[in-house]
């Protein structure tokens, strides 16, 4: 009976070793880099932002770049203008026909204002 338990443990311990060996061989053949992304920051403000400022849109740096209009941000005490800029799509967005959905402020049911960050969709 003890021999059977030891064999089971050896089998259970051998499986992760095989997986690690296969993973190490795969990692040596192909390096994968994962860029961590921060979750979107939730911003709630008790009053509406000022009207948007007028901006002159410069030529895009690339044919697929999308303009993200400037918008007001809340720094905890007052509104501050954040100038517009171009967003470069991820490779999957170009092949999938995605487009840039600009960030915008939305009035909440309680009267506060919440920032909805821009995204590809």
Image (tube, rainbow, N blue to C red):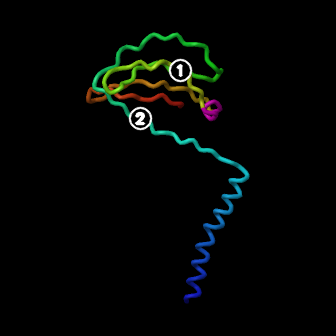
The residue at the point 35 percent across, 15 percent down is: 50
Residue 91, above or below 80: below
Q: Residue furthest right?
A: 29
- Asked if residue 62 lies left or right of residue 38, the reply is right
The residue at the point 50 percent across, 30 percent down is: 119
Q: CA distance from mark 1 to mark 2?
A: 19 Å
The residue at the point 47 percent across, 18 percent down is: 83
Comparing 82 with 111, the one in front is: 82
Magenta region, mostly helix, strand or loop?
Answer: helix
Q: Residue furthest bottom?
A: 1
Q: How many marks?
A: 2
Is residue 94 located in the magenta-colored stretch of the structure? yes
Residue 40, above or below 16: above
The residue at the point 29 percent across, 22 percent down is: 47
Counting from the top left corner in percent of width and height, residue 14 is at 63, 72
Residue 10 placement: quadrant: bottom right
> For mark 2, what is the residue?
41
Disc 2 element? loop
Residue 80 placement: quadrant: top left
- Asked if residue 65 lies left or right of residue 37, the reply is right
Position of the N terminus by quadrant:
bottom right
Using the image, tell me which numbered label, if any, was put on residue 14.
Answer: none
* Dot placed on the residue nearer the N-terminal end, 1 or 2: 2
**Which range of residues does the magenta coloring cover?**
90-95
Residue 82, above or below 5: above
> For mark 1, what is the residue?
85
Q: Which class describes the residues within 10 Å of circle 2: few (<14), some (14-19), or many (20+)?
A: few
Counting from the top left corner in percent of width and height, residue 73 is at 39, 23
Disc 1 element? strand
Counting from the top left corner in percent of width and height, residue 6 is at 58, 82
Residue 117 placement: quadrant: top left
């Amino acid at each position: 009976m003890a021999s059977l338990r030891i064999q089971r443990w050896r089998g259970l311990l051998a499986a992760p070793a095989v997986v690690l060996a296969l993973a190490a061989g795969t990692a040596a053949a192909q390096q994968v880099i994962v860029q961590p992304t921060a979750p979107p920051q939730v911003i709630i403000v008790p009053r509406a932002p000022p009207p948007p400022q007028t901006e002159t849109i410069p030529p895009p740096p690339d044919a697929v770049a999308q303009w993200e209009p400037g918008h007001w941000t809340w720094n905890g005490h007052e509104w501050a203008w954040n100038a517009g800029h171009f967003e470069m799509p991820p490779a999957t967005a170009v092949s999938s026909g995605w487009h840039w959905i600009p960030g915008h402020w939305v009035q909440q049911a309680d009267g506060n204002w919440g920032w909805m960050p821009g995204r590809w969709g």
